[in-house]
Amino acid sequence: MADQELIEKLKNVHAVNVTPFREDGTIDYEGLEENVRFLLDNGAEVIVPCGNTGEFYALTVEEAQAVARFVAEKVDGRATVLVGVGHDLKTAQEMALSAQDAGADAVMVHQPAHPHLMAEGLIRYYTRIARGLHIGVALYVRHPAIDRDVLDRVTALDNVVAVKYAVNDLPTFAAIAQSVTHPVAWICGTAELWAPFFFAAGAEGFTSGLVNIAPERSIAMLAALRRGDRRSIMSVWKEIAPLEKLRASHHSGNNVTVIKEAMNLLGLPGGYVREPVGELNEADRQELVRILKTWNKL
């Protein structure tokens, strides 16, 4: 039987913390601790180290395991810790066990990066990861190959507790969320810009990189979504839409860079990015400054 208490906790804002890098490319652990403290102090209830805003695929496996251990230690039970894991099956299993040993509440299995995906292979991949753990498992869906049949079979596993759906196909998501009967938390995986529409289709939480710079807006949106307060939802949506659209520019290449640069501008340790991510161009940086000024952050 799925862990209903954990499922309920995951129906929330999933605060995906950044991984701050120094100019020489090393991880700034003092900065990471400050970022985690900022999230906790500002009401984050689910923290996700090694997510995409944390540049998961730019981390070595050893670095990702170290970041997960560090964040779990600093959170120390004050929030639910959902650790990103992935890569090939053996590596994902090892990372998941490491996260479990570090005290994580659950792992989030990243979208498999293999260019060729098949239903039976995906089911075996998720099943073998989940069956090796006693903590929760969330699936991060970013490809339509992970369809209703795959999700129906995998969510039947006792410790699969959430699906973070990041394909912006609302009719398909609605059909899946309605037809999969096993209890899981359905999470909008494309953050605040899409959250109101995913909630209308069955989502109960959303991912957020914005929370690293404007947690009050993320939390206000969640509260309004829970109340069904359309006017308040759209008020927050209109405020955050320019920043989220800036993050989505250059085929989402700006996604992490905008958040890190905003943190740096606000005196938070966003740090540098790692390749293949690059720095903001000057026009985008000026647009970011303009947005932060309209929010009275600068």
Image (tube, helix red, strand yellow):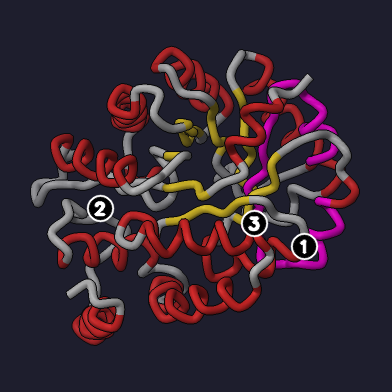
Q: First in sequence, mark 1 or 3: give its number.
A: 1
**In this picture, which residue range is highlighted in magenta?**
151-177
Left or right: residue 61 compared with residue 131: left
> Residue 32's image quarter?
top left
Amino acid type, mark 3: Arg
Q: First in sequence, mark 2 or 3: give its number.
A: 3
Element at label 2:
loop
Instruction: Name the front one of labels 1 and 2.
Output: 1
Quarter of the image that includes the C terminus: bottom left
> Where in the figure is residue 277, as x and y percent of width and height?
31, 60
| C-alpha gap between disc 1 and disc 3 | 14 Å
Pick whichever, 240 or 149, lies toward us.
Answer: 240
Left or right: residue 173 compared with residue 242: right
Q: Is residue 152 magenta?
A: yes
Image point 75% across, 51% down: which residue? 145
Q: Residues within 10 Å of mark 1 (few under 14, many from 20)?
A: many
Q: Residues within 10 Å of mark 3 (few under 14, many from 20)?
A: some
Residue marked by disc 3: 226
Residue marked by disc 2: 274
> Where in the figure is residue 100, as x and y percent of width and height?
48, 17
